[in-house]
Image (cartoon, grey):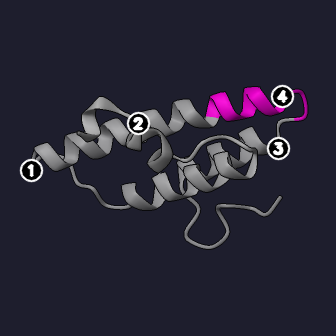
Amino acid sequence: MPDLGSAAAVTPIADRINEILAAPGLAREERIKGLTLLRDDARAEQRAASESGMIDDDGLTDVLTRLDLAISRLGGEALADEEGRSPASL
């Protein structure tokens, strides 16, 4: 699996993504769960940034894209797929 942090400056989230993907003792489902939790946190931060001028959205979209790509590669559902079924998307 490619290093998802190598295309841009390595960030703490990119490091965390790579740690989860490379963890030798984690099953695929556990990797997806860990990445999904990170994605939920990043999505909440993005929502907060869009609702407040106090938090900068700098890089959050890229983080969500990286997380979605990693989750999809493991066979999980992308954020767009989940949000399409969410009541919040109505």
Upstream in sequence: badge 3 or badge 1: 3
Residue type, label 1? Gly
Which range of residues does the magenta coloring cover?
A: 24-34
Does the residue at mark 4 contact the one at mark 2 (Cβ under 8 Å)?
no
Q: Where is mark 4, residue-wise? A: 26
Q: From the viewer's perspective, is residue 10 above or below residue 13?
A: below
Q: Where is mark 3, residue-wise? A: 22
Question: Which type of secondary structure does the marked residue at label 4 adopt?
Answer: loop
Q: Residue at x 67, y 61 (%)?
A: 4
Cα separation between marks 3 and 1: 36 Å
Upstream in sequence: badge 3 or badge 2: 3
Q: Which image quadrant: the C terminus?
A: top left
Report the front residue among 16 and 73.
Answer: 73
Does the residue at mark 4 contact the one at mark 3 (Cβ under 8 Å)?
no
Residue type, label 4? Leu
**Between marks 4 and 2 in the image, the one whose residue lies nearer the viewer:** 2
Upstream in sequence: badge 1 or badge 2: 1
The spot of residue 18 in percent (x, y) is: 71, 49
Report the front residue among 55 and 87.
Answer: 87
Is 43 situated left or right of 24 in this image?
A: left
Cα separation between marks 4 and 3: 9 Å
The spot of residue 79 in percent (x, y) is: 48, 45
Cα separation between marks 1 and 2: 29 Å
Q: From the viewer's perspective, is residue 38 above or below residue 62?
A: above
Cα separation between marks 4 and 1: 38 Å
Q: Residue furthest bottom?
A: 7
Upstream in sequence: badge 4 or badge 2: 4
Q: Where is mark 2, residue-wise? A: 85
Cα separation between marks 3 and 2: 31 Å
Question: Which type of secondary structure does the marked residue at label 1 adopt?
Answer: loop
Q: Residue at x 21, y 40 (%)?
A: 48
Q: Where is mark 1, residue-wise? A: 53
